[in-house]
């Protein structure tokens, strides 16, 4: 029976991380699995709280980092631990704001590998409004698309900072329209069929034995957060590694719950999101 390891990146929001862990323990019926939680330098002692809570649980490992290393580096710590220390056959990297809702999620992931020989697999990810978030892009992003994406996100980021500094309440209309357009674009990408060569949504990546054998880390450490999906898709394409979306696998996603919890309000959250997105798109452009 293949060994499966879930990797969860924790930061500050212990209630959200606990729900994620409990959903695995309560829903998943597959027997040979473990959970690795990486506390990404939380300064509110929640990493220590998790370690204390699960100190008697042999199926859950808690790794506490001194500093916040961001999404890619933080998850790579957990991935490397799963690969090197736990000898994982499959590594499932999930956001801490996701919840398992299928009892046979792991069995389906393994069966899909036996049928399709994927390197990286992504499930259908449904947020709290019932919106399907994966695939994030129905093809591999091109250089021209990345340039256009950078210009739009850069201008929007500048607008948000101006909005905050001058408190232009009337201009909030532009802010809302941008978010509505971005959400509408993503909704139109949902498909109820398997699809290869797509950009998966980053709340859940399933790494197969083929990927694990060829990669010491899961993600390129070029970004603090955001853009990991595009970078991973480009890397898989370059190496001719199959990246696959399978809607038969489903998870629930409380999108951006942690970011909201940290930043307090919508405007601050979007400034944080946009500034890091601009940096990430620069990293993506460097790969062409």
Image (cartoon, grey):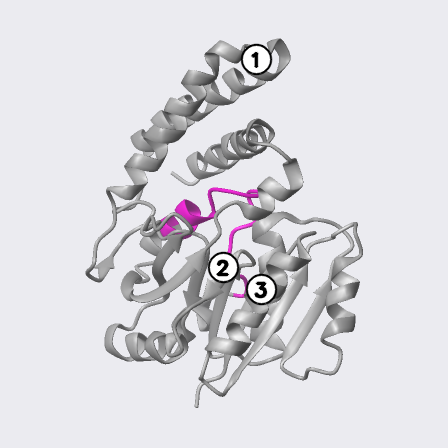
- Which residue does the numbered mark 3 point to in the structure image? 19
Q: Is residue 86 left or right of residue 174?
A: right
Q: Residue furthest bottom?
A: 1
Task: From the image, tell me which residue sits under label 1.
Answer: 162
For numbered disc 3, what is the local secondary structure? helix
On screen, residue 146 above or below 201: above
**Residue identified by numbered label 2:** 98
Q: Which mark is residue 286?
A: none
User: The residue tagged with tag 1: helix, strand or loop?
Assistant: helix
Q: CA distance from mark 1 to mark 3?
A: 37 Å
Q: Is residue 229 magenta?
A: yes
Residue 116, image x, y percentages: 25, 72
Task: Please indicate, yes or no, whether residue 189 appears anywhere in the rendered image.
Answer: yes
Residue 138 position within the rendered picture, expressed as x and y whole percent measured from the top left: 25, 47
Q: Of the two numbered discs 2 and 1 on the same chain, state the one appearing first in sequence.
A: 2
Question: Where are the magenta residues, as a range?
Answer: 216-234
Pick whichever, 267 or 244, lies toward us.
267
In the image, is residue 235 above or below residue 49? above
Q: Is residue 238 magenta?
A: no
Q: Which quadrant would residue 184 be assigned to in this image?
A: top left
Q: Tag 2, which secondary structure?
A: strand
Give whichever of 217, 122 is nearer the camera: 122
User: Which residue lies at the image location 37% right of the left edge and 51% below the top edge?
Assistant: 233
Q: Disc 2 or disc 1, which is closer to the eye?
A: 2
């Amino acid at each position: 029976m293949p060994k499966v390891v879930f990797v969860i990146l924790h930061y500050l929001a212990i209630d959200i991380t606990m729900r994620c862990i409990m959903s695995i323990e309560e829903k998943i019926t597959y027997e040979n699995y473990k959970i690795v939680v990486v506390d990404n330098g939380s300064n509110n002692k929640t990493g220590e709280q998790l370690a204390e809570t699960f100190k008697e649980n042999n199926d859950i490992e808690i790794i506490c980092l001194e500093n916040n290393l961001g999404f890619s580096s933080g998850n790579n710590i957990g991935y490397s631990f799963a690969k090197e220390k736990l000898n994982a056959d499959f590594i499932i990297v999930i956001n801490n704001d996701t919840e398992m809702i299928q009892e046979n999620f792991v069995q389906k992931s393994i069966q899909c590998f036996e049928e399709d020989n994927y390197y990286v697999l992504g499930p259908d990810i449904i947020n709290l409004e019932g919106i399907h978030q994966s695939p994030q892009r129905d093809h591999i992003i091109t250089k021209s698309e990345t340039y256009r994406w950078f210009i739009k996100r850069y201008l929007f980021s500048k607008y948000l900072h101006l909005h905050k500094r001058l408190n232009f309440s009337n201009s909030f209309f532009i802010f809302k329209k941008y978010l509505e357009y971005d959400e509408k674009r993503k909704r139109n990408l949902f498909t109820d069929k398997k699809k290869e060569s797509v950009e998966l949504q980053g709340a859940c990546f399933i790494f197969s034995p083929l990927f694990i054998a060829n990669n010491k880390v899961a993600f390129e450490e070029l970004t603090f957060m955001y853009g990991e999906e595009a970078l991973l898709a480009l890397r898989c394409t370059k190496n001719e590694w199959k990246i696959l979306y399978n809607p038969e696998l489903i998870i629930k996603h409380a999108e951006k719950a942690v970011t909201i919890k940290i930043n307090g309000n919508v405007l601050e959250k979007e400034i944080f999101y946009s500034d890091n997105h601009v940096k990430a798109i620069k990293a993506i452009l460097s790969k062409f």
